[in-house]
Amino acid sequence: MAKNKTTENKLSVSDFLNKVEDDTKRKDSFELVEIISKTTGFEAKMWGTAIVGFGSYHYVYESGREGDAPLVGFSPRKDAFALYLSSQLKDREALLEKFGKHKTAKACVYIKKLSDIDVEILKKLVTNSVERIKSLYP
């Protein structure tokens, strides 16, 4: 079975974020690290070359595929931040209604900048996501 490409590693989060070209996105990236670290109690770690993750869990799918992933994470992509959250977190839709300007995919929420969103709602999304993942993968 193929190994996951996106694994926790020893690369520097600060070095990665300091390479973000856009000043606002770079500043917001460091703020996201602060917000998510304080909310989860986990230190930011690099996962692969472009994801900042917090905490980790081990999953095993029915197919037999297994691996490790961050409990929550983000990536400062060119167009937007990708926030990696559980797609099944408690009150997801209700929280996203109050969240501010964003787009969604199955497990990702995309934002352009922190000033577009309600940071208190972000904290609830992060907390609920971590709780959901921990309940699925104790």
Image (tube, rainbow, N blue to C red):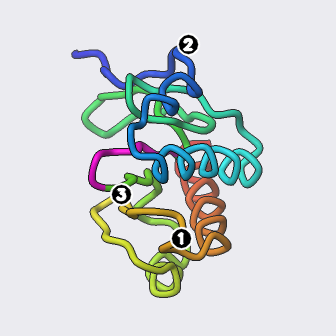
- SS at mark 2 in the image: loop
The reply to whether the C-beta atoms of the residues labelled 2 and 3 are less than 8 Å apart is no
Give, as a three-letter code, the residue at label 2: Lys
Whether the residues at callouts 2 and 1 have beta carbons within 8 Å, the answer is: no
Q: Quadrant of residue 50?
A: top left
Which amino acid, by three-letter code, is at mark 1? Ser
Crowdedness near tag 2: few (<14), some (14–19) or many (≥20) residues, C-alpha within 10 Å: few
In this picture, residue 15 sits left or right of residue 61: right
- The residue that disc 3 covers is 107
Looking at the picture, does residue 52 appear above or below residue 81?
above
Rounded to the nearest angstrom, the CA distance separating label 2 from label 3 is 25 Å
x 44%, y 81%: residue: 93
Residue 87 locus on image (x, y percent): 40, 62
Give the quadrant of the N terminus.
top left
Measured from the top left, where is residue 81 in percent x and y? Answer: 39, 53
Q: CA distance from mark 2 to mark 1?
A: 30 Å
Residue at image position (38%, 52%) is 82
Closest to the observer: 123 or 63?
Answer: 123
Quarter holding the C terminus? top right
Secondary structure under the numbered disc 1 in the rendered image: helix
Bounds of the magenta segment = 73-79
Residue 115, numbered circle: 1
Q: Nearer the viewer, mark 2 or mark 3?
A: 2
Lateral position of residue 79 relative to residue 116, left or right: left
